[in-house]
Each structure stands twice: as C-alpha cells, then as structure tokens.
Amino acid sequence: MNVGTASSDTLIAGRALSLWVLTDGKIGDDVQCLAVAAALATDFEKRVIAPRWPWHWLAPWGPMDPYDAPHKQASPIAPPYPDLLIASGRRAIPYARAVKRASGGKTFVVIMKDPRIATRHADLIWAPAHDRLTGANVFSTLTSPHGLAAKIAEARGNSAQAIAKLPRPMLGVVLGGPSGGAHFNARATADLTQKILNAKKDFASLAVIASRRTPAGLLRTIGEAVAGPDVMVWDGAGDNPYIDILANASALIVTADSHNMMSEAVATGAAIYAWRPPGLVRKLAWFVDQLEALGAVRPLDGNVKTFAAAPIDATAEIVAEIKRQMERGRAKRWLFNEGD
C-alpha cells in the first residue's frame, strides 16, 4: 500500500528514497512509524505482518513465521527490498531481521522503541528517553514522533464545526485508560471528575475526548458531571475531533498513561496539565517529571490557568538522525568498495 504526505523526498544516489513501514498494525506503533516515514518520503509502503502461533509468541527472539518467507509471493516482505525499513513492535522484529539478511545488508533498518533484543540487529534504534536504552546505534528523545504539527496548524484555521462553535477560551480534556499498572477505579474516576469540574469554571467551554482504552464508565461519569451548554463530550460518533481539540484548546488536561498522548499534547504550545492515574509505571512518571521540569507541563493539583509553553516536537530531530546515519552508512560502504 502506498501512502505518504511529505512535501519533498530524501534522495539516495540521486533518486527518491524507497521506504517500507513494517508493524503488526497497532495504532501506537503506526503513529510513530508513519510520522517519521512521511517526513522522509512522499511515497512509501506500509506492510502489515500477522505471524501465526507460535511465531507471534516467540517474537522478538525467535524466527519469523515461515509462511511469510520472502520468496513466497504473498509474503509481506517480498522483494524488491527498500533503501530504508522502519519497524516497530516485537512481532515485527524477526521480519526486520529477515529483510536485513535477504537484502544483503543494503536495507537500512530502523527500529522504533526498545526491540528487547541485542541492538546490533538494527542500524539505528530510536527509543524514548524513559526506556534508558543505550548503545552506539541508539538515539533517544524525551517525546515521541507524531507528525501532527501541520494538522494542528490547519485545524486552527479551519476546525470542525463541533469545536469551532464552542466559545473561547476552551478547556480540552484528553482521556486515556488502563495501561500497565495504571488503573481508573471508582476513587480515581471521582478524583479526575472533580478536578475537571473545578477547572471548567475558569473557561468558556469544555471539550472532552476519549481514547480506545478509556473505560466506558469513566467517560459516562465525566460526561454526566460536566453536561451543560458549551460542553462537547465526544462519544465516538461522527468525525474524531481530537486534532481540533489539540489545536484550539487554551489549556489541556491529559491523563498521563500514554507517552504518545502526552507527546502530542506538548507539541501544541497550550498549557498542559497532567493527571497521573494510580499505579502509573515509574518510567512514565519520570517522563512527566521531565516535562514538568521543562515548564511544558504542570500537575493537575489546583486551579487550571493558561500559561506560555514552547511546543516540544521530536519528529524532525529523529528524522535528521536517520538521514545522518544513513549517509554515514553509505560512506562506510563506499570506503570499503561495497557500493550501493
């Protein structure tokens, strides 16, 4: 499948870069990989793998599903092989290793997030700083890539009707859900609901949006508590107003259970308030601590006021590192007369 939105192509030996994105289709992996890919190439292919049991269980350490071997016509990694492969998710790792071998080492392999195997199996690994992954070929940033900058800018000038009609200033609420140790029990739900109600008093309108992981009971409780004029609670029907909320909120309350959600929020330049659910894993707590130390985020423990915050977006930094390492790899091959 060919997809892509970049305005210009990265060139390899005078031609456009060929690129695959390889995941098992999980939204969190896709968001990161597609954002980086779109910044590198106008045309790239998204290839989705679905290994059978027991191969999906053996990943990332075991071999790929032999049913998907590269020489088979229906294989998701059938040649011709690309210049660059961006992979994410443990099930994709055996396939990325297979492409590296089958291409004779010519495909530059980038793995997004900790692959949970030796780092030597990739040419470059991007991992969020909270993973504390180290290695000569490891590159880390505090926030994750997402590619929302252009969409946010567009939504500020032409937002969806449901958001455009809300008076300003608008408070946005972005809800996650149980993840790792984080939980949203009755006590946590009551705490978050009350804090949203307290914050709502200082804003002309409120927009609430849930993620795929948001418990129905949490959304229902908050929706009933905040109901009234100039309030929009998205229940999943119709167009998703997520980008429009990010683009137009003067302040955002975000549950801190998702690295991607927090990374996207701090790219807006809005005042961000993080609510930490009980049981939040240590590495995500550390991540929020760093954002608070930078002044990009404040804890949701009192009144919610707008404040100036410089947008944080690691996407361009990650793309630049991939380009640098690819060029370095090409130069090394040339020195040893391996060619392109």
Image (spheres, grey):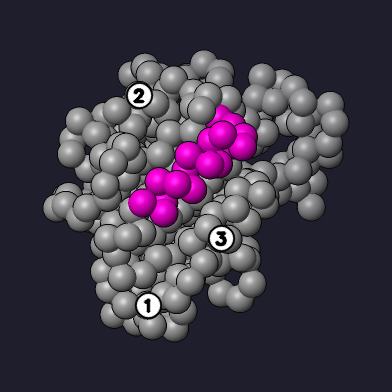
Q: Residue at x 26, y 69 (%)?
A: 169
Q: Residues within 10 Å of mark 2 (few under 14, many from 20)?
A: few
Against 313, residue 65 (above or below) is above
Q: If you read the primary sequence from the N terminus, does the residue marked by circle 2 or circle 3 appear first?
A: 3
Residue of label 3 = 223
The nearer-to-camera label among 3 and 1 is 3
User: Residue 67 at x, y = what percent?
Assistant: 83, 39
Rendered image quadrant of residue 68: top right
- Circles 2 and 1: CB atoms closer than 8 Å: no
Q: Residue at x 29, y 57 (%)?
A: 251
The dominant secondary structure in magenta is helix
Q: Split into 4 quadrants, where in the image is the C terminus?
A: top left
Residue of label 2 = 286
Residue of label 1 = 166
Q: Residues within 10 Å of mark 1 (few under 14, many from 20)?
A: some
Rendered image quadrant of residue 243: bottom left
Q: Is residue 189 magenta?
A: yes
Tell whether 65 sits left or right of 10: right
Against 206, residue 18 (above or below) is above
User: Residue 120 at x, y = what percent?
Assistant: 47, 19
Q: If you read the primary sequence from the N terminus, does the residue marked by circle 2 or circle 1 appear first?
A: 1
Task: Identify residue type, mark 1.
Answer: Leu
CA gap between label 3 and label 1 equals 16 Å
The nearer-to-camera label among 2 and 1 is 1
Q: Split into 4 quadrants, where in the image is the N terminus?
A: bottom right
Q: Nearer the viewer, residue 100 or 223?
A: 223
* Region rendered in magenta: 182-198
